[in-house]
Image (tube, rainbow, N blue to C red):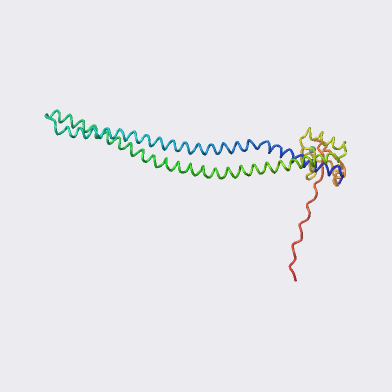
């Protein structure tokens, strides 16, 4: 293989790594922000569930207060019933008792509704708390992983930049100039030939060009997209299966 082509292939791999690593490192704060917002949302879920439970309890206490008032009135009426002097007063008092008793029924029904609702809300709160606990674990693990990945890439990046500089210094200036120019224009400067096609723009190589390039001994640019082409190394043949011992 042409020494400059070999360097360009490695240069491209290194530049691709550097680009991806920089992008991923730049994304780090955004990824952490995403985790924070997931945690905040799970925490808010618990707060909301707690607020609904508290609201239910407050509502039930208010109804119980009303019920106590009506029951006090009812027992007062029942006491007064013994002291009425006329039939008319007696009928009126019975009517008052009937109204109060109906109200007691309505309020008791409301308390029952609140109690049933409380069961559902307690289950909802338990569920939200379980989700928060599980999210906390998952998010902490992801945060750790993101941090470690960023750290690893930072180290790798320093090494890659040094390697890039060495490769660039070793490459013939004219070849490096072509590489830089194509890369500036196309993003990727060096690509494989796949089944006779440029793997970037998918234009077929002329058979003669393919023949010339096959051993990767020349710097050859795709006639369509100008990217520098090379034939990838053939994968090594699979080893023979081991033969059993006699
Ligand atoms: Zn091409």
The percent position of residue 149, horizontal first and vertical second, equals 67, 43
In this view of the protein, which residue sits in the foreground, 195 or 15?
15
Give me the residue at 42% from left, 42% from top: 122
How far from the left and from the top, in percent, is residue 133? 52, 44
Would you say 32 lies left or right of 66 here?
Answer: right
Is residue 91 found left or right of 41 in the rendered image? left
Q: Is residue 210 above or below residue 104?
A: below
Looking at this view, name the residue that lies furthest to the bottom: 246
Residue at the image position 79 percent from the left and 39 percent from the top: 203
Count of all numbered marks drawn on residues in the image: 0
Which quadrant of the structure image shows residue 148? top right
* Residue 111 image position (x, y, % from top left): 33, 37
Nearer the observer, 90 or 239 = 90
Instruction: Give residue 40's quadrant in the image.
Output: top right
Q: Position of residue 215 (x, y in %)?
A: 86, 47
Residue at the location (36% across, 38% down)? 114
- Quarter occupied by the C terminus: bottom right
Residue placed at 72% from the left, 42% from the top?
155
Give the quadrant of ligand 1.
Answer: top right
């Amino acid at each position: 293989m042409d020494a400059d082509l070999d360097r360009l292939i490695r240069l491209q791999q290194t530049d691709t790594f550097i680009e991806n690593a920089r992008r991923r490192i730049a994304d780090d704060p955004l990824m952490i922000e995403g985790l924070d917002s997931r945690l905040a949302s799970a925490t808010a879920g618990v707060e909301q569930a707690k607020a609904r439970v508290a609201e239910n309890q407050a509502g039930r206490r208010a109804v119980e207060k009303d019920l106590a008032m009506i029951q006090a009135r009812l027992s007062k009426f029942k006491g007064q019933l013994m002291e009425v002097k006329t039939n008319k007063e007696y009928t009126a008092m019975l009517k008052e008792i009937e109204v109060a008793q109906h109200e007691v029924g309505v309020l008791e029904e409301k308390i029952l509704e609140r109690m049933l609702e409380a069961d559902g809300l307690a289950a909802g709160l338990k569920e939200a708390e379980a989700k928060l606990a599980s999210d906390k674990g998952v998010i902490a693990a992801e945060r750790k992983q993101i941090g470690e990945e960023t750290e690893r890439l930072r180290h790798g990046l320093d090494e890659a930049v040094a390697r890039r500089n060495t490769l660039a210094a070793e490459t013939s200036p004219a070849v490096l100039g072509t590489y830089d120019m194509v890369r500036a224009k196309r993003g990727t400067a060096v690509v494989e030939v796949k089944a006779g096609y440029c793997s970037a723009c998918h234009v077929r190589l002329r058979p003669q060009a393919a023949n010339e390039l096959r051993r990767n001994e020349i710097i050859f640019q795709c006639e369509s997209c100008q990217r520098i082409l090379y034939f990838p190394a053939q994968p090594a043949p699979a080893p023979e299966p081991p033969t059993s011992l006699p």
